[in-house]
Amino acid sequence: MGDIAQADYLKTGPVRLFLTFQFSLEDRLEDKLPRVRAPMLVVRGALDPICSQEWAEFVARRLPRGRLVVLPDVAHTLVYTAARELAAARLPLSRAPRDSEAERTTPANQGLRDGHRALGTIR
């Protein structure tokens, strides 16, 4: 995963890392995906040892307006190692015609687990 991820894990500490991992198992993302109304782009690096092709395809299929892009010769930390390719992959989505305001605006805390709230609105 590289020096950046390793440094992040060291800063986080083992307790926080474990609790975050445990929460991710309990707070099932896959159950929430069908409620996402906005167009979504799932991006995976072809060399990613953590996010399998099967999982990325599953996520894209569960999203009502999901699309999968696989970046060749890229691993899991594509935000750091393939930022230009990632930006280029999202351009068609950002240039697509926008939906109505009602479809573009979703309360940030909609669908979040009880006791966890976000502030503002996702646009």
Image (spheres, helix red, strand yellow):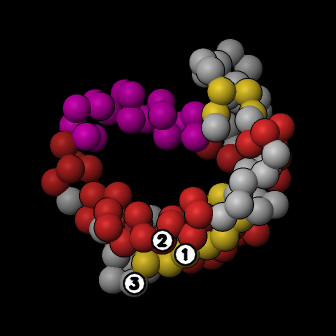
Dividing the picture into quadrants, the one containing residue 85 is: bottom left
**Of marks 2 and 3, the one in the foreground:** 2
**Mark 3 vs 1: CB contact within 8 A:** no
**Of marks 2 and 1, the one in the foreground:** 2
Quickly name the residue at label 3. Answer: 72
Quickly name the residue at label 1. Answer: 69
The answer to if 19 sits in the magenta stretch is yes
In the figure, is residue 88 to the left or right of 55? left
Upstream in the sequence, badge 2 or badge 1? 1
Residue at x 38% of width, y 78% of height: 47
Quickly name the residue at label 2. Answer: 89
- The amino acid sitting under disc 1 is Val
Residue at x 66% of width, y 64% of height: 96
Q: CA distance from mark 3 to mark 1?
A: 10 Å
**Whether residue 31 is visible:** no
What is the span of residues highlighted in magenta in the rendered image?
A: 8-24
Up-down relation of residue 17 to residue 56 (above or below): above
Q: CA distance from mark 2 to mark 3?
A: 12 Å
Q: Provide residue 37's location: percent of width, then percent of height.
A: 79, 49
Q: Provide residue 115's location: percent of width, then percent of height.
A: 68, 15
Q: Provide residue 1's location: percent of width, then percent of height.
A: 27, 61
**Mark 2 vs 1: CB contact within 8 A:** yes
Along the viewing direction, whichever of 33 and 83 lies nearer the viewer? 83
Residue at x 34% of width, y 76% of height: 74
Upstream in the sequence, badge 2 or badge 3? 3
Dividing the picture into quadrants, the one containing residue 15 is: top left
Residue at x 58% of width, y 34% of height: 23
Provide the major secondary structure of the magenta segment.
helix
